[in-house]
């Protein structure tokens, strides 16, 4: 898959230790042939994978980051480096197709056009289906010299065990609230929304930034007001579902999961309530249904969720 004109990235502040480890591995010739970056959505996995790919392809010697001046970096900036292949689904919720993976593997088995590394960057690795995953296995089992596969995944256990076992895994945790807040204030230029953005994003800085820049933060606040209306009885499940479908039906389940997760964490400090975790399981099932079927009636799905939530909220409050 071709990639668009880009910028050269730097590692995020909370990835400093991981980045230093990558640089040491490069310096002593101990980079793995396959690296799996995993962690929650919004902690910067794609950013780190892209930064590493650019650093590996840079033609300058001894740099910790891509230099931005050499021929390889200019190709990267133009979005036309012949030794970098990026795979990701064409749309959110879609799968990575087996033919795309086969083309990636073929390219990784050819000679590098710039004489250095060949990099395959799979940005949503858990979007590979069984056929795509099996097509990738041969490249993982028989790596070529100076070839690096970087897989990025929000859902580690959605990957085949045979793929996980053939990659060096690097977990990227959510940074501390202090670090996330400081970074977000600097990059967003909008200090008034930072605290709420961090809260609704469960501390994940890049998701918080997206919520601010896209206007999603305001919609998420509206959604949480709807949930609270169901909890206190001021909204029926039907009314709440209607409001949510008009608000942004496609993302409501993800927002709901984030909201319940935050409640469960807060409750967990005092022992927690199993009903929150049971409802989270209900949301996971709803998300899987939305991902697997294209004709789901969102109104009915959300009505069922809100009915269950009203019962759970009433039980928890008592």
Image (cartoon, rainbow, N blue to C red):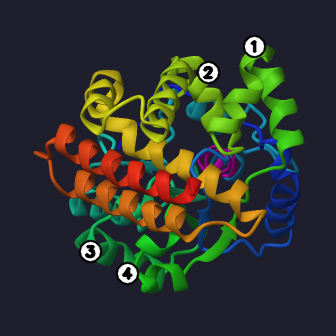
- CB contact under 8 Å: marks 2 and 1: yes
Q: Is residue 123 visible?
A: no
Distance from label 3 to label 4 (Cα)? 14 Å
Seen at 65% across and 32% down, the residue is 208
Give the residues drawn in magenta, as a range. 44-52
Q: Is residue 282 highlighted in magenta?
A: no
Q: Secondary structure at mark 4?
A: helix
Q: Which residue corresponds to the image point at 58% horizontal and 35% vertical from the top-left?
A: 76
Tags 1 and 4 in contact by the CB under 8 Å rule? no
Of marks 2 and 1, which one's residue comes earlier in the chain? 1
Q: Residue 212 shows which numbered tag?
A: 2
Q: Nearer the viewer, mark 3 or mark 1?
A: 1
Q: Quadrant of the N terminus?
A: top left
Q: Which mark is residue 190?
A: 1
Q: From what the image shows, is residue 281 above or below residue 66? A: below
> Which residue position is annotated with label 4?
138
Determine whether, in the image, residue 139 is placed left or right of residue 53.
Answer: left
Q: Quadrant of residue 202?
A: top right
Residue at 79% across, 62% down = 22
- Give the vertical position of 252 relative to 145 (above or below): above
Which numbered mark, 2 or 3, is in the foreground of this view? 2
- What numbered label is drawn on residue 130? 3
């Amino acid at each position: 898959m071709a990639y668009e004109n880009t910028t050269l990235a730097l590692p995020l502040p909370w990835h400093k230790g991981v980045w230093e480890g990558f640089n040491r591995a490069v310096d002593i010739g101990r980079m793995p042939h396959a690296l799996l970056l995993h962690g929650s959505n919004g902690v910067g996995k794609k950013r780190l994978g892209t930064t590493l790919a650019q650093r590996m392809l840079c033609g300058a010697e001894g740099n910790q980051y891509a230099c931005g001046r050499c021929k390889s970096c200019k190709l990267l900036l133009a979005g036309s480096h012949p030794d970098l292949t990026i795979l990701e689904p064409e749309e959110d919720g879609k799968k990575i197709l087996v033919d795309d993976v086969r083309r990636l593997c073929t390219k990784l088995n050819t000679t590098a056009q710039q004489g250095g590394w060949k990099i395959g960057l799979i940005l949503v690795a858990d979007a590979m289906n069984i056929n795509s995953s099996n097509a990738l296995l041969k490249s993982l089992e028989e790596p070529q010299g100076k070839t690096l596969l970087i897989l990025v995944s929000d859902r580690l256990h959605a990957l085949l065990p045979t793929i996980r076992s053939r990659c060096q895994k690097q977990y990227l945790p959510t940074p501390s609230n202090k670090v996330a807040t400081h970074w977000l204030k600097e990059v967003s230029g909008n200090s008034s929304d930072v605290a709420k953005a961090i809260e609704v994003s469960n501390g994940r800085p890049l998701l918080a930034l997206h919520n601010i820049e896209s206007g999603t933060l305001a919609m998420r606040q509206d959604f949480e007001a709807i949930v609270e209306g169901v909890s206190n009885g001021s909204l029926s499940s039907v009314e709440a579902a209607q409001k949510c479908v008009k608000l942004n039906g496609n993302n409501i389940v993800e927002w709901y999961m984030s909201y319940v997760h935050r409640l469960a964490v807060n409750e967990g400090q005092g022992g927690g309530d199993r009903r929150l975790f049971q409802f989270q399981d209900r949301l996971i099932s709803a998300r899987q249904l939305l991902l697997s079927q294209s004709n789901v009636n969102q109104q009915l799905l959300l009505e069922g969720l809100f009915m269950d939530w009203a019962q759970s909220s009433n039980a928890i409050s008592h």
